Image (cartoon, helix red, strand yellow):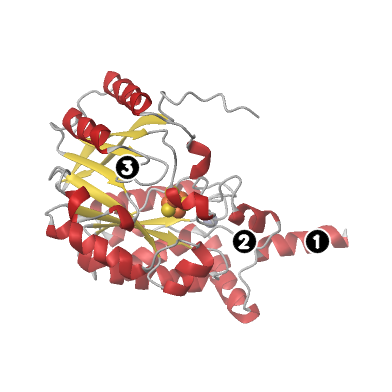
């Protein structure tokens, strides 16, 4: 089917709150349509649906029109986040001359943020980047096996460590993304993995954003999920990761889960999801572990879930297996 999306229009733009220099500020988020992540040609990552947000043959002119669109909706927010469907520092996605124009357009901002795979982070590409920039790195996990087999990331934790250290040496900030519950992991394995990964990332990070896996359309993870072989993580697991890390790392801990509370996203019993997600949001700003206090009867169900998975040694969706079993018996 012919893609009707225009290459000269932004994929999305919205406003939200984030932190800059220790205080809560308004932020503008723009998602640019580009030629897409270079890694998609190699199959991409198992949970990534970003290929849906990218096109082929996006020209420099198209990108500049997207910038114009963003500027027409810009209301002087101190923080601007510029996401592409891959790496902002990849010339094939955003040519250097376009990057320079974007940097210039937002030169009055307190803070800008963009993402990049580590292979595009070099002294040469960093030379053009303004000192107000934070570069987001998708480490996902510090376990090389998890990165290779479960995420299919195409780089190693050491590559991210090298890139993060180089960014810091250039006086810029690093936001590291971790993936909570990559496929083939039980809930408790994923909690341990996220905690270990945060400790690995802490020395070269200013912020660590824990992203619970959200099942996106057209991905390998979606196939597992449809077959009942994957359950998105519990919000309790996310809270547990923060509880274990709180006060033991210098980086700001944060999470703004996409699809939270839905079957495809991080969720609890349904009754407490909003309260639990609000607690995570509060903690992301205050860093006060008291903000993580939430009560619900499903907490013990979550504990039992961890235990059953451990005993059965399977990451399959046990709730769903149980429901299917009931359906079969009916
Ligand atoms: S997660 Fe990032 S690196 Fe992986 S395919 Fe998606 S955009 Fe590319
Ligand atoms: Zn609950």
Which of these two is toward me, 272 or 130?
130
Residue 185, position as x, y percentages in the image: 54, 70
Image marks 2 and 1: residues in contact by CB distance under 8 Å: no
Say which mark, if any, is on residue 230. 2
Task: Choose the circle earlier in sequence order: 1 or 3.
Answer: 3
* Residue at 31% in and 63% down: 160
Residue 164, position as x, y percentages in the image: 24, 61
Task: Choose the circle earlier in sequence order: 2 or 3.
Answer: 3
* Residue at 23% in and 32% down: 102
Q: Residue furthest right?
A: 330
Question: Disc 2 versus disc 3: distance between alpha carbons?
Answer: 36 Å
Q: How many marks?
A: 3
Which of these two is toward me, 326 or 42?
42
Residue 272 appears in the rendering: no
Image marks 2 and 3: residues in contact by CB distance under 8 Å: no
Tag 3 secondary structure:
loop
Image marks 1 and 3: residues in contact by CB distance under 8 Å: no
Task: Choose the circle earlier in sequence order: 2 or 1.
Answer: 2
Q: Which residue is mark 3?
A: 91
Q: Quadrant of the N terminus?
A: top right
Q: Quadrant of residue 323?
A: bottom right
Above or below, 296 relative to 240: above
Tag 2 secondary structure:
loop
Tell us which disc is closer to us: 2 or 3. 3
Which of these two is toward me, 126 or 15?
126
Residue 260, position as x, y percentages in the image: 49, 47
Say which mark, if any, is on residue 326. 1
């Amino acid at each position: 089917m012919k893609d009707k999306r225009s290459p000269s229009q932004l994929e999305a733009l919205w406003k939200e709150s984030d932190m800059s220099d220790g205080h809560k500020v308004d932020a503008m988020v723009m998602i640019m349509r580009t030629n897409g992540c270079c890694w998609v040609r190699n199959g991409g990552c198992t949970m990534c649906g970003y290929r849906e947000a990218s096109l082929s043959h996006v020209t420099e002119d198209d990108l500049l029109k997207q910038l114009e669109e963003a500027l027409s909706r810009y209301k002087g927010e101190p923080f601007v986040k510029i996401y592409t469907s891959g790496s902002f520092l990849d010339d094939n996605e955003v040519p250097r001359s376009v990057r320079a124009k974007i940097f210039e357009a937002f030169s009055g901002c307190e803070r800008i943020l963009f993402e990049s795979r580590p292979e595009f982070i070099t002294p040469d590409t960093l030379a053009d980047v303004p000192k107000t920039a934070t570069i987001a790195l998708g480490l996902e996990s510090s376990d090389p096996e998890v990165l290779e087999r479960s995420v299919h990331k195409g780089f190693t934790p050491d590559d991210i460590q090298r890139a993060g250290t180089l960014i810091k040496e250039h006086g810029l900030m690093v936001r590291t993304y971790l993936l909570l519950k990559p496929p083939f992991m039980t809930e408790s394995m994923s909690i341990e993995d996220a905690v270990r990964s945060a400790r690995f990332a802490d020395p070269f990070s200013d912020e660590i954003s824990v992203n619970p896996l959200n099942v996106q359309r057209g991905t390998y993870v979606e196939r597992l999920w449809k077959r009942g072989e994957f359950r998105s993580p519990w919000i309790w697991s996310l809270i547990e990761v923060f509880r274990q890390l709180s006060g033991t790392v210098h980086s700001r801990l944060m999470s703004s889960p996409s699809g939270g509370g839905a079957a495809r996203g991080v969720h609890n019993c349904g009754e407490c999801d909003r309260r639990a997600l609000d607690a995570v949001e509060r903690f992301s700003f205050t860093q006060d572990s008291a903000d993580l206090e939430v009560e619900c009867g499903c907490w013990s169900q979550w504990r039992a879930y961890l235990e059953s998975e451990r005993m059965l040694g399977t990451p399959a969706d046990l709730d769903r297996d149980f429901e299917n079993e009931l359906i079969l018996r009916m």
